[in-house]
Image (spheres, rainbow, N blue to C red):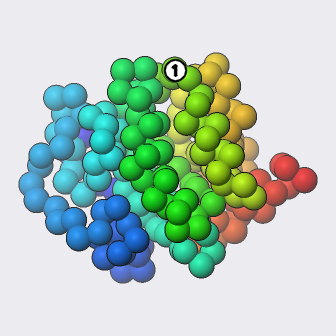
């Protein structure tokens, strides 16, 4: 796992360590200190309070009200209440800055263990006219989300799965997703 790096193509356009509104502002990256269980992870992933789920904020556009967050590890609400850490330590900060469209990229999320939907419901209600989209998560994670009724709060699947997302600009990805989500709602 130590070789899995967060996507860095947009670093010159947005860097959370240089964003005064980011909870990661001023952070410096040292050596390999973070781990998922006994597996060291690349030092560029950011700690959100969970010992099993890490993130990297790839892009934020405060004027347009969107962010793209890549995730790594095990999303474990049962043992570690990971959604609480994600919500309180990152999402709440972004919501306060006017972000209401969230793209979660989960290609490196290896498992999901659900519990209750309270934080998901809260987050969903706070985005008002926005959305929460999950892209790149494995099918068995989608099945678990459905089992815990998270499909009411999170959007995924179909045209929301943009396989070539790394070749597009952040704005283009959000444009595609926004169009599809609005079509689903409308």
Expressed as whole percent of the image width and height from the top left, the position of residue 70 reads 43, 52
Q: Is residue 11 left or right of residue 105?
A: left
Q: Which residue is farthest right?
A: 186
Q: Can I make out residue 128 in this image?
A: yes
Q: Is residue 111 left or right of residue 43?
A: right
Q: Residue at left 44%, top 37%?
A: 84
Q: Residue at left 45%, top 59%?
A: 93
* Other-residue count near label 1 (Cα within 10 Å), few / some / many at <14 / 14–19 / ≥20: some
Q: Can I make out residue 109 in this image?
A: no
Say which of 74 and 139 sits in front: 74
Q: Which residue is farthest front?
A: 96
Q: Residue at left 59%, top 67%?
A: 98
Q: Is residue 26 left or right of residue 100?
A: left
Q: Quadrant of residue 170?
A: bottom right
Expressed as whole percent of the image width and height from the top left, the position of residue 43 reads 19, 54
Q: Residue at left 60%, top 45%?
A: 123
Question: Which residue is tagged 1?
Answer: 115
Q: Of helix, strand and loop, which one carries label 1?
A: loop
Expressed as whole percent of the image width and height from the top left, the position of residue 86 reads 43, 44
Examine the rendered structure and indicate whether residue 64 appears above or below residue 114: below
Say which of 41 and 28 sits in front: 28
- The number of callouts visible is 1
Examine the rendered structure and indicate whether residue 82 appears above or below residue 29: above
Q: Is residue 112 left or right of residue 25?
A: right
Expressed as whole percent of the image width and height from the top left, the position of residue 33 reads 12, 46
Examine the rendered structure and indicate whether residue 145 appears above or below residue 41: above
């Amino acid at each position: 796992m130590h070789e899995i790096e967060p996507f860095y193509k947009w670093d010159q356009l947005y860097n959370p360590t240089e964003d005064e509104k980011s909870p990661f502002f001023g952070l410096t990256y040292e050596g390999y200190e973070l781990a998922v269980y006994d597996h060291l992870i690349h030092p560029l992933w950011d700690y959100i309070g969970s010992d099993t789920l890490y993130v990297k904020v790839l892009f934020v556009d405060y004027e347009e009200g969107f962010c793209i967050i890549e995730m790594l590890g095990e999303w474990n609400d049962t043992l570690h209440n990971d959604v609480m850490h994600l919500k309180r330590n990152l999402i709440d900060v972004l919501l306060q800055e006017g972000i209401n469209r969230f793209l979660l990229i989960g290609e490196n999320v290896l498992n999901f263990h659900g519990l209750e939907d309270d934080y998901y419901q809260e987050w969903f209600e706070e985005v008002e006219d926005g959305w929460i989209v999950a892209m790149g998560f494995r099918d068995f994670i989608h099945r678990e989300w459905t089992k815990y009724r998270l499909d009411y709060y999170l959007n995924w699947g179909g045209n929301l799965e943009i396989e070539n997302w790394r070749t597009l600009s952040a704005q283009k990805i959000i444009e595609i997703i926004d169009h599809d989500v609005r079509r689903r709602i409308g």
